[in-house]
Amino acid sequence: MAYYKVLDFKKEPFSTSPDPEFFYLSRDHETALTNALIELRLKRGLSVILGDVGTGKTTLSRKLIQELKERPDFLFHIILDPYFEDQKTFMQHLVRSFDIPIDYKNAAMLELRDAFEEYLFQKGVIEGKTVVLIIDESQKIDQQTLEALRILLNYETNQFKLLQLVLLGQMEFHSKIIDMPNFQDRVSFKYALNPLNFKETKEMINFRIQKAGYSANMHLFLDGAIKEIYHYTKGYPRQITTFCHRAIKALVLRKKFVVDQQLVGELIQDDINLGWHKSKLVQKNSY
């Protein structure tokens, strides 16, 4: 039997997989998601969402996809690893991913671009659909691919951009954008995700517990434990999730009923003994 079923959970409450159903929308995440959707509906072109490692960018991208799936007038593709050898390889990937009828393996670069532009015009203007490209881990994008994206953002009508682009990346991606002013000028919406505050940390833990099907009347995590978790993780969602997973396992193995401050303290001490504890800096909510 899975450890979490001992506590009568229907699902694992603290999996680190980017499941949008378990994604707690903090104020920052909701702001980023809402604004990105507005930009897409208005066909403004380029949105950039930045955040430190573990702030929830990947799960936010899955939440965005979940929203787009419910809208039949949107066509989208997500790139999880945006490293490409050159611009041609990138364009080949795009025409293949959007099922554009062209012999992409043998087509020249100009032919690939023309085919993609025709596709964007057909879908965006004639059929009235919105074509969206979402790129996660955008800090991996090199200058050549950024230049290819800049060119694609030039495809537009008098009213709107034909391609909607959402880039999610670590804070270091900011310097790449700054170093390319003619790309930076095309950013319509930009946002930087902060770690959670204490209130949000508590809400996130309880949200995931409830989503997993926990129905007992007693609180599984006591307030003292949550305070220790918050101070230890600095409010980073991925670290909170990982630590709570460990706490639930320890709860079962030690035959306890609640995660209290003592249990959390023991787990933190284990990390300190192993040399795994390190502090993080909080990012500003803008760039």
Image: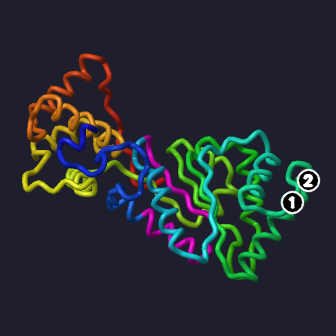
**Category of crowding for the residue at label 2, using alpha-carbon neighbours closer than 10 angstroms: few (below 14), some (14–19), many (at least 20):** some
* x and y percentages locating residue 257 in the rendered image: 8, 40
38 magenta-colored: yes
Residue 68 vertical position relative to residue 52 in the rendered view, above or below: below
What's the magenta region? 32-53
Please say whether residue 123 is visible from this viewpoint. Answer: yes
Tag shown at residue 265? none
Kindly give the residue lying farthest to the front in the view shown. Answer: 1
Three-letter code, disc 2: Ala
Q: Position of residue 185 (x, y in %)?
A: 65, 61
Q: Is residue 286 above or below residue 86?
A: below
Residue 107, numbered label? 2
Is 7 drawn above or below residue 199 in the view shown?
above
- Residue 201 visible in the snapshot: no
Residue that badge 1 annotates: 102
Mark count: 2
Please give left or right for residue 67 compared with residue 251 in the image: right
